[in-house]
Amino acid sequence: MADGILGLGSSGSVDLSSELITKLKTAESTSILDPIKTEQEDTQTEIDALSKIQTMVLELLDLVDDFDLFTSDTNIFDEVSATTTGSSVSFDATDTSNMEEGTVSIEVTQLAQKDVYQSNTISDITATMDLGTISITIDDTTYDFSTDGKTYEELVSEMNKNSGLEVSLEQVGDTNYRMVIKSLESGSDNGLTITQTDIDLGLEDTDNHVLIAQNLLATIDGIDYEKSSNKVTLESGLIIKAVSKGTSTITIEKDNTSVVEGIVSIADKYNNLVDLVNSYILGDEDENAVISDSGTLKTMMSEIKGVLFDSYGLENEENLFKYGIFFDSDGYMQVDETELTEALTDNYDDIKELFTGYAEKEGIGTRLKTYLDSLDGIDGLLTAYDDKLNGRLETLKDEYQTASNKLDEKYEQMSTQFAAYTVLITQMENSFASLKSIINDTSSS
């Protein structure tokens, strides 16, 4: 006789185990969840690649900003280099756009200085003074300071509340101090007049008037200047600060080196961007293309190249190729630095027109800055693509979670059913075992 029917009597209930459910769930997860997971990973890789492109675009934008007509900083064509002789003055400039090439000559015959008084020496600055008054006149206004019952420290503190004074207690020896009173500003108009009543700290002694307020006297390119400050700012934006008597010159020239370096940096960054974009949309021998929508990046590169290839100037008479800048057969931007440097010497204004342009006819730098800036704007090409990829990633995450939940629910139900089947099969196997025993007993009798 057969050992069992449909597994009955052959431990069929053991086959309906959790191990079987796990194998079934793993197989179905592989076919349903793994493709979604793979697409998630591919999308994230694409987002990371796009982020690198956006970063390089911003780096190119930073370089191009120096050539923008409307830049908030000094345009690179407004930058100048300077060489100086002499040490009587130092030079600076916050805006070089109005500076003309040439040499500025400066002769300093007198430095501006503050009015400075010192007291006699003081051995104990915490000692209390007797009744008296110190009067200080500044710009026709007199201020009276009572000394009655005050320490030197307290008197100095009170004097410093006046905005036109700078008062201190200076240690001038191992045990000696002097009260030092200075006008806050230099120049003869800021001189001080000090008188003492019923007290004598030596402030009216001629020897204690250690510096007398005076103006700067200087001649700049033949023009005489008398100013209360040692700093003179010319209409051109050049800032001259006198530091000693003597003669100095500053020679100002257009900074051609910075312009050449700036253009070379733009070319290098553009070429890096070409390589990066090509690596993502073309792939290589070992990897497939990372970017699925190559059209977006091709459009971006085509627009950038279009700006670089276009004609400029009010009469469309200017282009890059006139000044040693060209594109090779692989699409890389090349700069002949020697030719460009010579062109800047001979045609500086034309090259400035080419790159910065005018409000009514923008140049390469101005147009390219506007375009690159727009790529990451609200409706920008890269912003839209980034939003699309992130939207796809969120959708895939939702799909994965939904599919995962359905599988969990399916196999939870299957586990419940298997458990019920196991109970039923076990009962049937037990009944069959009893029947089999009866049959065996009957056969043996």
Image: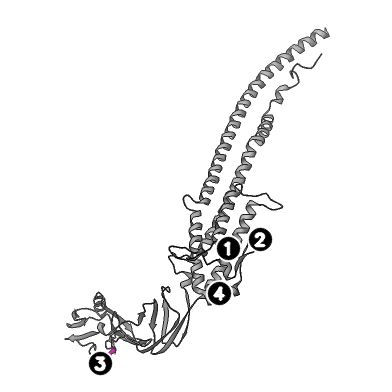
Mark 1 vs mark 3: in front: 1
The residue labelled by disc 3 is 206
- Residue sitting at 52 percent across and 46 percent down? 387
- Residue sitting at 52 percent across and 72 percent down? 259
Q: Give the CA separation, mark 1 to mark 3.
A: 68 Å
Residue 21 horizontal/vertical position (percent): 67, 29
Residue interval drawn in magenta: 205-214
Residue 193 horizontal/vertical position (percent): 21, 85
Q: Nearer the viewer, residue 200 or 340?
A: 340
- Residue sitting at 52 percent across and 73 percent down? 258
Mark 3 vs mark 2: in front: 2
Q: Which of 153 and 156 is in front in this view?
A: 156
Whether residues under marks 1 and 3 lie with C-beta atoms below 8 angstroms apart, the answer is no
Q: Give the CA separation, mark 4 to mark 2.
A: 26 Å
Identify residue type, mark 2: Asp
Identify residue type, mark 3: Thr
Identify residue type, mark 1: Lys
The residue labelled by disc 1 is 269
Residue 261 horizontal/vertical position (percent): 55, 71
Tag of residue 330: 2
